Amino acid sequence: QVQLVESGGGLVQPGGSLRLSCAASRSISTNAMGWYRQAPGKEREWVASISGDFTSYTGSVKGRFTISTDVDKNILYLQMNSLKPDDTAVYYCNFITNQISWGRGTQVIVSS
């Protein structure tokens, strides 16, 4: 079964940037992929997705986050700029359809 491993999280001040990575154990070039997040005490929510050249974002991150893939390296990225405290969450990657079991995610904390 394909494995997805998230990395790149950390502690950052408001207004800062982070780039998250999701390494896949096989090619993801033909899959629609997404980033999701779960804040403390809240349900997991969809953040962004990519399918070929088409990307989409939840309203709260539009204009600040950019999802992309490196198909040669089988990596999904999420560039996060102008981070806000409300972006604090554990971030996960997964397929948009036929999702696999959720990984451990990567923790993002936005705080001064």
Image (cartoon, grey):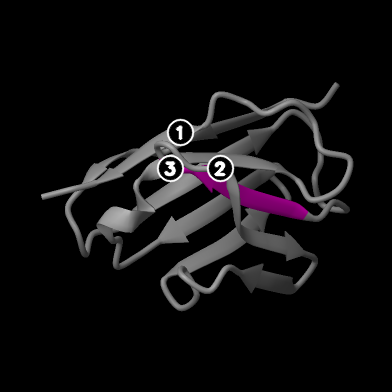
28 horizontally vs 77: left or right:
right
State the residue lying farthest toward the front. Answer: 41
Residue 106 numbered tag:
1
64 horizontally vs 36: left or right:
left
Q: Nearer the viewer, residue 88 or 10?
A: 88
Horizontal and vertical percent position of residue 94? 71, 41
Mark 2 is surrounded, within 10 Å at the Cα level, by few (under 14), some (14 to 19) or many (20 or more) other residues, namely: few
In this view, the mark in front (1 or 2): 2
59 horizontally vs 49: left or right:
left
**Sequence-wise first label, 1 or 2:** 2
Q: How far apart are the two marked residues, 3 and 2, measured between alpha carbons?
A: 7 Å
Horizontal and vertical percent position of residue 78? 51, 55
- Magenta stretch: give its range: 33-39
Residue depicted at 41% across the width and 42% down the height:
89
Residue depicted at 56% across the width and 52% down the height:
77
Residue on which the image places disc 3? 39
Residue on which the image places disc 2? 43
Residue depicted at 26% across the width and 55% down the height:
85
Amino acid type of disc 3? Ala
State the residue lying farthest toward the left. Answer: 112
Secondary structure type for disc 2: loop
Mark 1 is surrounded, within 10 Å at the Cα level, by few (under 14), some (14 to 19) or many (20 or more) other residues, namely: many
Asked whether residue 37 is drawn in magenta, I would say yes
